[in-house]
Amino acid sequence: MTLANGHVLVTGFEPFDRDTVNPSWEVARALDGWVCEGATVRAVQLPCVFGRAAERLDEALAHGMPQLVVGLGLASGRTEWTPERVAVNCDDARIPDNAGQQPIDQPVEPLGPAAYFSSLPIKAIVQALRAQGLPASVSNTAGSFVCNHVFYALMHRLATRPALAAARGGFVHVPCLPEQAALHPGAPSMALATQVQALQVLLRTALTVRADVRVTGGQLH
């Protein structure tokens, strides 16, 4: 069943950690204005900065209530598109963000719960991506950098703001682009066109699947 017509918010990040490009933003902006299942995609770039990224998310959410929100972020070293299962209430930065902040063991929301689960049909998304020949798997950790910060902030807002009660949301980590991997021989990558196709499949699945499929997505480690 397709959700009522509206718009889909897709966020991506600016480059960070000496990179000059971030695939999460390149993929998101490639589909800005694309219409999927009657819903128009709106792409918004977030700063890779603790606090400020959540503020920019708030601005985007206030600009017309979306029916679906998908955050994208780069996970260097991953070989697949990985929908995240859970966001944790912890900022613990291995490296400084783009403003030089490096929080350690700080809550994203001081009064928030320990964690939130994604409300995307993550296993159905993985299944749909694989059916199209696109590498994908469920991820059980979004880390503790700005990606998790935004993921948790998003889910907290969806859970606590009545105007967003009908919206669903979640976060997906994506691989490097080939031009990034070229600077690090042996690093995995995925072409931009392939990643754009993956986002199209993901959005179509998220807009049409209400109940997730019951297949294994667990990991030993």
Image (spheres, grey):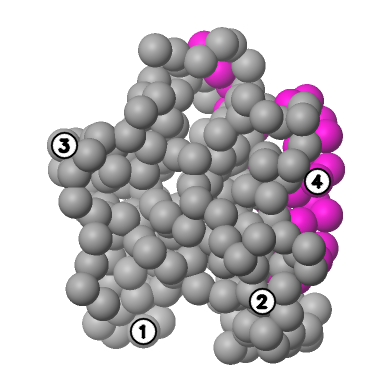
Q: In this picture, is 65 found above or below 93?
A: above
Q: In this picture, is 144 found above or below 140?
A: below
**At label 2, which amino acid type do we have?**
Asp
* Quadrant placement of the N terminus: top left
Q: CA distance from mark 1 to mark 2?
A: 27 Å
Mark 4 against mark 2, which lies toward the viewer? 2
Q: In this picture, is 77 found above or below 210?
A: below
**At label 4, which amino acid type do we have?**
Asp
Q: Earlier in the sequence, mark 3 or mark 1?
A: 3
Residue 92 lies left or right of residue 65; in this view the side is left
Q: Residues within 10 Å of mark 3 (few under 14, many from 20)?
A: few
Q: CA distance from mark 1 to mark 4?
A: 35 Å
Q: Earlier in the sequence, mark 1 or mark 4?
A: 4
SS at circle 1: loop
Q: Earlier in the sequence, mark 1 or mark 2?
A: 2
Q: Earlier in the sequence, mark 4 or mark 2?
A: 4
**At label 3, which amino acid type do we have?**
Ala
SS at circle 3: helix
Q: CA distance from mark 3 to mark 1?
A: 30 Å
Q: What span is in magenta? A: 38-65
Residue visible at 56% across and 18% down in the picture: 39
Q: Earlier in the sequence, mark 3 or mark 2?
A: 2
Q: Residue 67: give x, y in percent of width and height.
A: 61, 25
Residue visible at 32% across and 39% down in the picture: 125
Write down the residue under mark 4: 58
SS at circle 2: loop
Write down the residue under mark 1: 184
**At label 1, which amino acid type do we have?**
His
Write down the residue under mark 3: 131
